[in-house]
Every structure is written in C-alpha cells, then in structure tokens.
Image: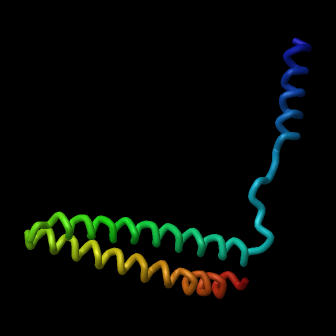
Amino acid sequence: MLVAASVVVTAAAASAETTHVIALADSVDEVLTNIRNWIMGILALLATVFLTIGGVRYVLAGGDPSEVEKAKQSFKSAGFGYGLAALAPLVVEILKGIVGA
C-alpha cells in the first residue's frame, strides 16, 4: 500500500516538472501576423492546386467544350484564391482594429 502511494506521488511530481510551453507569443500583434502568414500560405497553395488542375484539364480537353469549361472554372477559382491570399493582410488589419492591437 505504501509503495502504491509513493508511485502516485512520484508520478504526479514528475509530470508537473516536465510541463513546458512550446509556443508562446510575445504579443497579439505577433499572433495576428502568424495567422496572416498561415492564411496567405494556405490560400496560395490551394490556388496553385486549382491552377494546376485547370491547366491539366485544358490540355487534356481535346476540344471537348464541357472539359474546356471545367478548366476555365478551375482558372477562375485559382484567381479567386490568389485574390483572397492578397487580401489576407487587410483582413488581419481589420482584426487588429477589432482586438485593439
């Protein structure tokens, strides 16, 4: 019984000592800047995927009007994604205004 109690106490103390904070932002401004960078990266990646899909569809369309239209729609989606990625800094500035950073 005494051994079991000492194991529990030792385990609780050991887990309390190994707690480390890995990501600690210095300010809200740094957090919002990181959010902006992640948003821009993800949107640019998705837009590039849509641009690639559109290019492949256009090349493989072989004159089929429906496939060409699907390729054009992929190009439009890619343009929309790049536009949103370009507007990400504006969104972060609006968030800064709301938060007061």
Along the horizontal axis of the image, is 81 left or right of 88? left
Residue 16 position in % (x across, y down): 85, 40
Quadrant (top left, top right, bottom left, bottom right) of the C terminus: bottom right
Q: How is the image coloured?
A: rainbow
Q: Is residue 55 above or below residue 17?
A: below
27 above or below 7? below
Image quadrant assignment for residue 56: bottom left
Q: Is residue 40 left or right of residue 19?
A: left
Whole-percent x, y for residue 85 in the image = 48, 78
- In the picture as drawn, the residue positioned furthest to the top comes out as 1
Q: How many marks are shown on the rendered structure?
A: 0
Of residues 9 and 77, the one nearer the viewer is: 77
Q: Closer to the camera, 97 or 39? A: 39
Q: Position of residue 55 (x, y in %)?
A: 27, 69
Which is more toward the observer, 28 or 56? Answer: 56
Residue for point 91% across, 14% down: 2
Q: Would you say 82 lies left or right of 34 here?
A: left
**Quadrant assignment for the N terminus:** top right
- Measuring 29% from the left and 65% from the top, which residue is drawn there? 53
In the image, farthest residue toward the left: 64
Residue located at (84% from left, 25% from top)? 8
Horizontally, is 63 left or right of 90 in the view?
left
